[in-house]
């Protein structure tokens, strides 16, 4: 393989890596005001740093709220708790989203969990 082909492969890989980062950004349908901030998108790249322990904690919070789910990874409240852990924002931030945007966050978390490797 020539040096030129190797460079092209590396360039493609870097482009794919950049697209993965962008895939973890959720754009809201309209700007969202929370406390003193106006937010139009949220970076969910913190999902990459979560551990199974974060999932266990989220499941405990979900159960303590009286919400029992057979498959919590598809539960709206559970995914919002996970999103809060991933972004460092309080869960109240996510619970105040418009329904369409809350579902976007839910879908992002769910697809992250169940996405292909």
Image: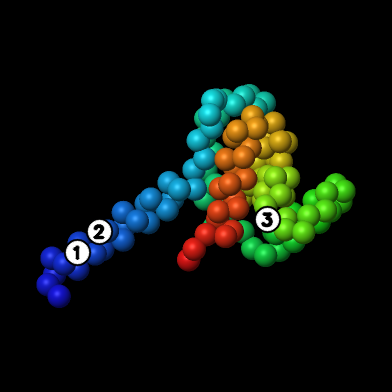
In the image shown, does 74 or 85 lie closer to the viewer? 74
Residue 84 position within the rendered picture, expressed as x and y whole percent measured from the top left: 66, 45
Chain-order first, disc 3 or disc 1: 1
Q: Please name the residue that numbered disc 3 is placed on.
A: 73
Visible residue check, residue 102: yes
Q: Is label 3 in contact with label 1 (beta carbons under 8 Å)?
A: no
Visible residue check, residue 85: no
Distance between the Cα atoms at labels 2 and 1? Answer: 6 Å
Q: Residue at x 35, y 56 (%)?
A: 16
Q: Which mark is residue 7?
A: 1
Q: Residue at x 59, y 42 (%)?
A: 105
CA neighbours of label 1 inside 10 A, class few (<14), some (14 to 19), many (20+): few
CA neighbours of label 3 inside 10 A, class few (<14), some (14 to 19), many (20+): many
The kind of secondary structure element at disc 3 is helix
Q: Please name the residue that numbered disc 2 is placed on.
A: 11
Q: Which mark is residue 96?
A: none
In the rendered image of this protein, does residue 2 appear above or below residue 95?
below
The kind of secondary structure element at disc 2 is helix
In the rendered image of this protein, does residue 105 appear above or below residue 111?
above
Q: Nearer the viewer, mark 3 or mark 2?
A: 3
């Amino acid at each position: 393989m020539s040096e030129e082909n190797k460079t092209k492969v590396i360039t493609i890989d870097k482009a794919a890596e950049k697209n993965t980062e962008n895939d973890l950004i959720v754009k809201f349908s309209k700007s969202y005001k929370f406390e003193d901030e106006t937010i139009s998108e949220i970076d969910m790249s913190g999902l990459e740093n979560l551990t199974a322990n974060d999932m266990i904690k989220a499941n405990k919070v979900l159960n303590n709220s009286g919400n029992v789910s057979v498959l919590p990874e598809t539960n709206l409240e559970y995914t919002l708790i996970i999103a809060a852990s991933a972004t460092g924002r309080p869960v109240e931030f996510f619970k105040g989203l418009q329904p369409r945007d809350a579902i976007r966050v839910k879908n992002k978390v769910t697809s992250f969990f169940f996405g292909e490797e």
